[in-house]
Amino acid sequence: MSYIGIIITYVFISNFILTQFLGMCPFIGVSKNVESAVGMGFAVTFVMGLASLVTWAIQYYVLVPFNIVFLQTITFILVIAALVQFVEMVIQKIAPPLYKALGIYLPLITTNCAVLGIALISVRSSYNAIESFIAGISGGLGFLLAILIMSTIREKLDSEDVPKVFRNIPIAFVTAGLMAMAFMAFDKVLLKNLIG
Amino acid sequence: MIKELTKGIFKENPIFIIVLGLCPALGVSTKVINALGMGAGVIFVLLCSNILVSLLKDFIPDKVRIPSYIVIIASFVTIVEMVMQAYSPALYKNLGVFVPLIVVNCIILGRAEAFANKNSIIPSIFDALGMGIGFTLGLLLIALIRETFASGTITLFKMGSFNGIITIPGLVDSPVRIIGMAAGALLVMGYLKAFFNWYTTRK
């Protein structure tokens, strides 16, 4: 699959949130205002890109040669946890303003299914290093897109008269459902027409 | 003791009240049998990790407790993966990437951090069972609604002459396909959460 194909696939066609439900917890939890949603979105994109590259290297230089692929789940989650910790320390050291903006979201990312999800999906789709990296970044961008749209809608919803039982989380789910319906317009046929 | 068991089933239901563990709840709820398989996996991992964490809570240094919990959980998830692959390959294929993703199911890490590292083994077992059953029931409810409307069937195990699929007349011929898709899952979840909000604040 071409690189553009991968980007379109993970941003639109199989958007992590709206078609595969990966990363649902932060999507509902951190989408109350636009600012924090954007912060979370960028932090996730950054970690997903790095994580899919690093886990690709682990898979093909450690797990496969030593014939210990059954340890995949444990290794990947540990690598992701260590990576998140490492990224947090590096950003804190070299870019304090960025750390101030993303800092509080970074620890939450370890348990974001989207990160482990993209690592596993890249390996299962047998992507090469560059393809894995691009898939990671585009998966993150898809997350950013969804959470940005969602937070904008939720800010508007705050001033609307929503029935009491639907306030907050239920209406967020219903909104996400309607967004998912809109995203159903992006399908494989579209990809075929675009890049042949 | 019974309180620890029952709180997870309704009052603190992980899916509908605390709203955790959503990825698997929505991702695998297209068929009842997938929901059952997922529920069994989560109960097993939750039970084992709660037992181990409550036994080891005095030995794990506070600073590295989260990584240690993750390793404990990931080991049990690997066991589930292997057992499922060996004895029920069809289910393993259906659940796909969601089996290894049990590791990042917030419910399991959440119970280790919030309950098992403060309590002794017996309450931790009951807590794990209650939360696990609560999660499974929530998952089953979503799956029942989605499968019934989206394909007009309820898929269970094969038993003797029963082929494992209950068909619902009427819905089989004209199903509401959208409920089976991603959008439907989110809508069903939204309405169920609203129902639980109404039910718990009704008095």
Image (tube, grey):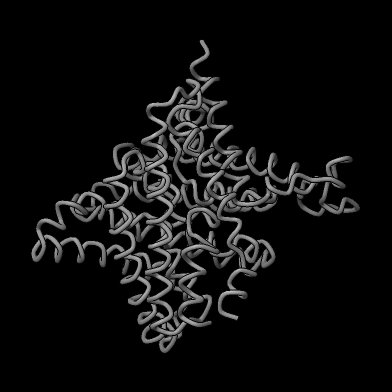
The residue positioned farthest toward the front in the image shown = A194
Residue B176 occupies which quadrant of the picture?
top right
The residue positioned farthest toward the bottom in the image shown = A65
Residue B126: x and y in percent read 47, 36
| In-image side of B189 versus B111 (left or right) | right
**Residue at (52, 42) in percent of width and height:** B132
**Residue at (30, 65) in percent of width and height:** A47
| In-image side of B25 versus A146 (left or right) | right
Residue B130: x and y in percent read 51, 35
In the image, residue A44 sits, relative to residue A49, either above or below, namely above
Quadrant in which the N terminus of chain B appears: top left
Residue B69: x and y in percent read 33, 54
A48 or B3, which lies in front?
A48
For residue A58, say whether it is visible. yes
Residue A140 occupies which quadrant of the picture?
bottom left
Number of numbered labels in the structure image: 0
| In-image side of A62 versus A185 (left or right) | left
For residue B51, say whether it is visible. no
**Residue at (39, 83) in percent of width and height:** A129
B104 or B8, which lies in front?
B104
Residue A58: x and y in percent read 36, 80
A142 or B118, which lies in front?
A142
The residue positioned farthest toward the top in the image shown = B203
